[in-house]
């Protein structure tokens, strides 16, 4: 059985990397209630795997792998129906509304729309790329070669350019 | 707008969002994380329950078959049902093991490949159960009436009646497929029935195969 110390350490690490939760949940679920469920699901799976976490590895890489895997599974109806945990009340991750920024909002809406049109795996790739992960890190998280990562990112960039140009 | 500029805006926006979010640590402490460790357990639990029911069926059928080993008219249907139950049990055991060994901390493509293969196995097992069930109706009738009530159905019903029932079971399969293909897509609000219809019609299998093919293309493309 894991001790309270392990739980404290886990919560501390999770808190430092909560941005990953925000980004992954935001990219895979637009509905706020669903997003809360997804965050709870990711946190539950992170805790489930925490005992096996290799301390030599980067926590963020490990967290991204689990978060993306859970998010993809969550999107698929079958797993959504067999929800892991009851939705937490209030939410595990509380987000305060931020003031609108008209200058960037349009551009971000365009980017979000573009990301949403991507399939689940390319969406993960784009998310990791936007989050400034190196090709090697992206390859390690997704389990594909760096060359493959580079090729796919190149294609996505081209597609995004075309999308921007046509709007 | 250039991609780098978009990327910058994206990261800025996420930084703000991250700064305005906080992990509810108090709630976290109260939240029983051990209880949360149940997604795969629950899935495996459902399959395990089916497995227990199957195992009881296998034992009872084996018992019945052994009791009637010198009476082929009872032994053959019991053996058919037993083989059917064993096939379901084997598929169930495989699923429970696969589910229990699933770790989300492996690379995304590898895990999604396993999840997808697991889904395929589940769909195939359900299709097998649904499509073979009508064929098992007559053997079940023979065994159940004998085993539960001591009635020899061969003495009560005419052979023609039994043959007609077997043929009906056979006929039900294509009819079920046709109905599922025609009406399944219209059942938008009846999720469970729609899911069943999709499995009988083969739509679930086709979709799962497509997803698996897309996943493999994603992994292989250079």
Image (tube, rainbow, N blue to C red):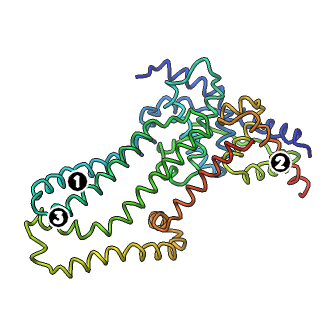
> Which quadrant of the rendered structure holds the C terminus of chain B?
top right
Q: Tally the numbered discs.
A: 3
Q: CA distance from mark 2 to mark 3?
A: 70 Å
User: Dot 2: within a 10 Å radius of its alpha carbon, few (fewer than 14), some, or many (20 or more) residues?
Assistant: some
Residue named by callout 2:
A105
Subunit bearing disc 3 = B
Which numbered mark, 2 or 3, is in the foreground of this view?
3
- Toward which corner of the image does residue A126 lie, by quadrant? top right
What kind of element bears circle 1?
Answer: helix
Which numbered mark, 1 or 3, is in the foreground of this view?
3
Q: Are marks 2 and 1 on the same chain?
A: no
Asked if residue B28 shows in the view, the reply is yes
User: Dot 3: within a 10 Å radius of its alpha carbon, few (fewer than 14), some, or many (20 or more) residues?
Assistant: many
| Drawn side of residue A99 relative to residue B29, left or right | right
Subunit bearing disc 2 = A
Query: Compared to A134, does A9 lie above or below?
Result: above
Sequence-wise, the earlier of marks 1 and 3 is: 1
What kind of element bears circle 2?
Answer: helix
């Amino acid at each position: 059985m894991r001790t309270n110390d392990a739980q404290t350490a886990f919560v501390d690490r999770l808190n430092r990397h909560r941005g990953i939760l925000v980004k992954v949940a935001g990219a895979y679920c637009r509905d706020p209630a669903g997003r809360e469920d997804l965050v709870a699901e990711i946190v539950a799976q992170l805790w489930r795997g925490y005992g096996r976490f290799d301390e030599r590895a980067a926590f963020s890489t490990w967290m991204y792998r689990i978060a993306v895997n859970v998010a993809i599974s969550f999107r698929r109806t079958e797993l959504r129906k067999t929800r892991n945990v009851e939705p937490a009340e209030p939410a595990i991750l509380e987000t305060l509304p931020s003031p609108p920024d008209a200058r960037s909002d349009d551009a971000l809406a365009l980017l979000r729309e573009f990301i949403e049109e991507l399939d689940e795996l390319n969406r993960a790739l784009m998310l990791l790329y936007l989050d400034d992960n190196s090709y090697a890190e992206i390859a390690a998280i997704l389990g594909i070669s760096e060359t493959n990562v580079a090729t796919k990112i190149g294609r996505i960039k081209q597609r995004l350019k075309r999308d921007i140009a046509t709007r | 707008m250039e991609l780098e500029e978009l990327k910058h805006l994206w990261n800025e926006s996420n930084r703000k969002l991250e700064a305005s979010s906080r992990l509810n640590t108090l709630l976290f402490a109260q939240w029983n994380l051990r209880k949360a460790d149940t997604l795969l357990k629950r899935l495996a639990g459902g399959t395990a329950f089916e497995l227990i029911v199957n195992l009881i069926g296998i034992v009872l059928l084996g018992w019945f078959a052994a009791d009637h080993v010198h009476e082929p008219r009872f032994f053959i249907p019991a053996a058919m049902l037993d083989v059917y139950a064993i096939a379901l049990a084997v598929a169930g055991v495989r699923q429970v093991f696969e589910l229990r060994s699933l770790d989300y901390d492996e690379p995304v493509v590898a895990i999604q490949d396993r999840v997808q293969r697991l889904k395929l196995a589940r769909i195939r097992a359900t299709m097998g159960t649904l499509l073979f069930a009508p064929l098992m109706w007559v053997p079940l009738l023979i065994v159940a009436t004998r085993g539960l009530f001591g009635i020899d159905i061969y003495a009560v019903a005419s052979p023609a009646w039994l043959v007609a029932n077997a043929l009906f079971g056979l006929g039900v399969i294509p009819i079920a497929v046709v109905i599922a293909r025609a009406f399944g897509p219209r059942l938008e609000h009846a999720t469970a029935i729609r899911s069943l219809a999709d499995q009988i019609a083969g739509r679930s299998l086709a979709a799962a195969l497509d997803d698996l093919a897309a996943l493999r293309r994603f992994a292989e493309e250079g």
